[in-house]
Image: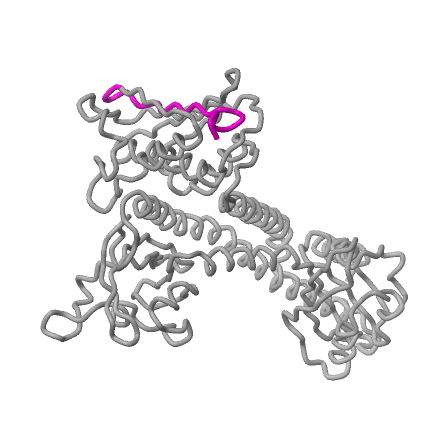
Amino acid sequence: MTDDRTAEVSALLEAAEAAAPAGIAFLDGDLRFVRVNAAFEAVAGEPAAALIGRTAQAALPAAPDRLLGVLREVLATAAPVVDLRIDAAPAAGRRRRWRIDCRSTPDGVCLLLSDVTEEEAAAALRNAFMRNMPEGLYTVDAAGRLTSLNNAASEMLGWAENELLGRSMHDAVHRPAPDGGPAGADRCALRRPAAMTEEVFVRRDGTPFQVVCSVAPLHEGSGGHGAVVTFRDVTAARRADLEAHHDQKLESLGRLSAGLAHEINTPIQFVGDNTRFLADAYEDMWQLLMVYRGCLAPELGEMAWDERTARAREAEEKADVEYLVAEIPAAVRQTLDGVDRVASLVRAMKSFSYKDTAEQSYADLNEAIRTTLTVARNEVKYVADVDLNLGELPEVLCHRGDLNQVFLNLLVNAADAMEDRERRGRIVISTRAAGPEVVISFTDDGSGIPEHIRQSIFDPFFTTKGVGKGSGQGLALARAVVDRHGGSIDVESAPGRGTTFTLRLPVNGRPDA
């Protein structure tokens, strides 16, 4: 084993440690730091110079006692500790959460330390979004078995989530057939995508109730297709405008829930795959280093140099060093890109789900449009390219949550107008200031609206979409919201050439408010 080769392997290990997304530290038998990577310095908040050669207790005075206890426990028992979450000392007044993975090494322990504060915050936001919404929501796998149930659904159905997990939701909530036997699962409406449909569910105590529900496909990590079902009890629901308003929001929620789940699942999937690959790669490199150290061990005595070289070469072939050198940096880049994508989606979900108060407030409508485009990306990306031509706007006094819904309806309508054709479509969203108003337009090059139905498109329940595609409430809701803001919405369209919806909103709110 040449010194040059040892140096090359050491450099490769250092590169792998530097590229790893988690903080990595090696400590000796006295729990003194021997080696740390840059990510560990960032998480621990201490530079390498303040760590190397010092004990964990001395070098990390702000570290939780649980961390020090884990290090001593692994050193004493050689039993690994995996995915332990602990509260770290506050940094700049903020509570931090650390993930700890610790394993024994021939000379001490190896500690992997990750800051999961943002990750857990994103998970909490996602859970709050899914579980605290007023509509019932549950997800099923490709076989129709329950995988999650939110609080509202649990209250309406009378079942706790853990009582239904893994069970067929068709068997649990559908009313029996007219002859009293079980309803046919092959005709179950909840197994087929539908933007809005009426069903009769049965509570745990056997009482039936009428629901309006939305069923959207949910792409699972294995490549199968489950479904996300949103529903609400309309047995004694209010009618007219209030009911129409809620129905349309429910339709959008069903489509967005599946789209967002897919958009988040894709980067999370390759982040997980890359993290597992990096863990395996690190183990391979560690085993290779152990072989190199073994070849240099004094106790081997006068072993022939050829035999030492053969051992090292065999270990290199087993580890596939050239492959690791090429793939580790790419895996790290993809992982960071995936984390950034999930973070941007979480920010967009939080902004889009903004809950209006009774009072209007000033909002950046350009940002509202960008947020809407982010959360609706899965609805548009397969059929059209979207161009943003956003001018400089003053903040507008409005109910931002209601306008988010209007923007979503217009964007989804534009995408729907370009389905079932060979070429990709184009959607242009433009904004500009016009004196005391702002002007927002959504233009598509889709199928257009025939003149004889143009005057009816804002009527409640009027739709030209196929069965199960739309409820005919989106544009009616859009006009109602714009009217409440003291604005206007107009349409220009030519069959076969496209459609433009133009909104005008007063900057300082409704004049007679």
> Compared with residue 106, is residue 136 higher up or lower down, i.e. above or below?
above
**In the image: residue 202, left or right of residue 47:** left
Work out whether residue 341 can be spotted. yes
User: Residue 263: horizontal and vertical position, in percent?
Assistant: 46, 48
For image coordinates 34% across by 22% down, the residue present is 490
Q: How many marks?
A: 0
Name the side, left or right, on which 483 lies relative to 420. right
Q: Nearer the viewer, residue 297 or 89?
A: 89
Q: Is 509 within the magenta? A: yes
Residue extending furthest toward the left: 179
Does residue 266 appear left or right of residue 287 in this picture?
left
Task: Name the quadrant of the N terminus.
Answer: bottom right
Range drawn in magenta: 494-513
When asked about the image quadrant of residue 135, the answer is bottom left
Q: Quadrant of residue 95?
A: bottom right
Any magenta on residue 326?
Answer: no
Q: Quadrant of residue 274?
A: bottom right
Please provide percent x and percent y for residue 486: 43, 27
- Name the residue nearer the viewer: 259 or 180: 180
Question: Where is residue 240 drawn, in percent x and y?
Answer: 27, 44
